[in-house]
């Protein structure tokens, strides 16, 4: 069964409704998302599912979905503040969406096969899609509790223009994820990759090849039921309701499942160099790297 690519695209809406102008970075105005979808098709994915906000549905269908039709089947699902389990209501004054794992939960009714979750604005590179596509397509029929994540080597995910936030991963002797810690400030300090600890001190992360999560996960549909259950626990904590910016993140759910011994998450190594536009100054570098990949023949000049 071909796996599905699930793209977290709810953040593509502007605060004022409508679609944020997608930055054309390729030779014919291609966006980072175009390259991810092209790579996923090459890696054997059979369907795209986008989670978006309802308020820019029409624009998204006209500008985005229309491009991929005829290349791969596409479906839309919607993330909304009031998409909550029975018995819970959205706190007054909350404007921020409920986070990445809440967005993932929206795919439950349309995704019945193994799937890969990605951000729509990160350039993951083909090797990463090949690695996770292979893992998902080789799972036995009806497999549960065997998940994966692509572990990017931290040295391949830095910005030259400032610090980055990354989920730094630890693995056990079987190569499975044993812990993931969000470090909000990572950069090279005196030639060594460090993170800023709670006391403001720069601490080495442990080498260029330390795996980090770039939010590229492989799940099977059983993940939806765990998420629904744990989301109720999350919402039942008064702190999460009082804090109008609290978020139900994927690593929160994954951490619980691995600590409970419910599921394993295989860390898939990739030599892929991640790139994205964290800072405005990153843009020119990304354009140049894409152009180099087109010149090398990795991508055609026109994708779709």
Image (cartoon, grey):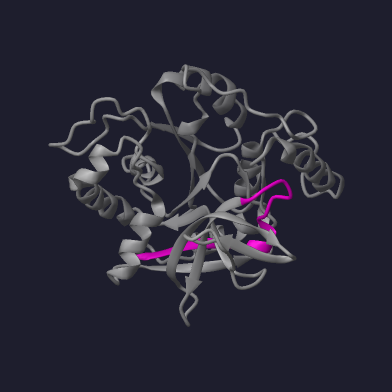
Residue 146 in the magenta stretch? The answer is yes
Displayed quadrant of residue 179? bottom left
State whether residue 78 is above or below residue 85. above
Q: Position of residue 177 (x, y in %)?
A: 45, 70
Q: Which residue extends farthest right? A: 295
- Residue 153 visible to the viewer: no
13 to 74, vertically: above or below:
above
Residue situated furthest left in the rendering = 87
Q: The C terminus lies in which quarter of the figure?
A: top right
Q: Which residue is drawn at 31% across and 64% down?
A: 257
Quadrant of residue 239 within the rendered picture: top left
Residue at 20% over, 51% down: 233
Res 117 visible: yes
Q: Where is residue 166 in the image (x, y as percent from the top left)?
A: 54, 55
As drawn, is 35 to the left or to the right of 228?
A: right
In the image, which residues are magenta? 144-163
Q: Which of 215 and 295 is in front in this view?
A: 215
Question: Quick one: 232 or 197, which is closer to the camera?
Answer: 197
181 vs 125, left or right, is left
Residue at (31, 35) in percent of width and height: 244
Q: How many marks?
A: 0
Q: Is residue 121 inside the magenta stretch?
A: no
Quarter of the rendering containing residue 106: top left
x then y, percent, for residue 295:
87, 45
Q: Where is residue 258 in the image (x, y as percent from the top left)?
A: 34, 68
């Amino acid at each position: 069964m071909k796996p599905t690519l699930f793209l977290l695209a709810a953040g593509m809406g502007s605060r004022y409704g409508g679609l944020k102008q997608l930055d054309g970075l390729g030779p014919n105005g291609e966006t980072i998302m175009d390259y991810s979808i092209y790579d996923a098709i090459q890696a054997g994915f059979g369907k795209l599912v986008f989670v978006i906000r309802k308020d820019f549905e029409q624009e998204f269908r006209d500008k985005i979905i229309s491009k991929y039709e005829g290349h791969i089947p596409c479906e839309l699902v919607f993330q909304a503040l009031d998409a909550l389990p029975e018995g819970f209501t959205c706190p007054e004054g909350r404007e921020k969406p409920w986070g990445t794992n809440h967005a993932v939960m929206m795919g439950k009714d349309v995704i019945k096969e193994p799937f890969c979750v990605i951000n729509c604005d990160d350039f993951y590179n083909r090797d990463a899609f090949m690695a996770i596509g292979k893992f998902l397509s080789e799972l036995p029929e009806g497999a549960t509790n065997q998940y994966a994540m692509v572990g990017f080597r931290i040295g391949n995910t830095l910005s030259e223009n400032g610090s980055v936030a990354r989920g730094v991963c630890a693995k056990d002797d079987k190569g499975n994820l044993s812990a993931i810690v969000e470090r909000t400030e990572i950069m090279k300090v005196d030639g060594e990759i460090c993170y800023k600890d709670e006391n403001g001190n720069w601490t080495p992360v442990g080498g260029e090849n330390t795996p980090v999560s770039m939010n590229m996960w492989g799940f099977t549909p059983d993940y939806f039921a765990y998420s629904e259950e744990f989301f109720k626990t999350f919402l039942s904590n008064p702190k999460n309701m009082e804090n109008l910016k609290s978020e139900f993140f994927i690593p929160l759910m994954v951490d619980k499942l691995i600590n409970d011994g419910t599921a394993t998450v295989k860390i898939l190594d990739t030599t892929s160099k991640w790139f994205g536009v964290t800072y405005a100054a990153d843009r020119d570098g990304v354009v140049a790297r894409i152009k180099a990949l087109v010149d090398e023949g990795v991508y055609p000049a026109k994708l779709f």
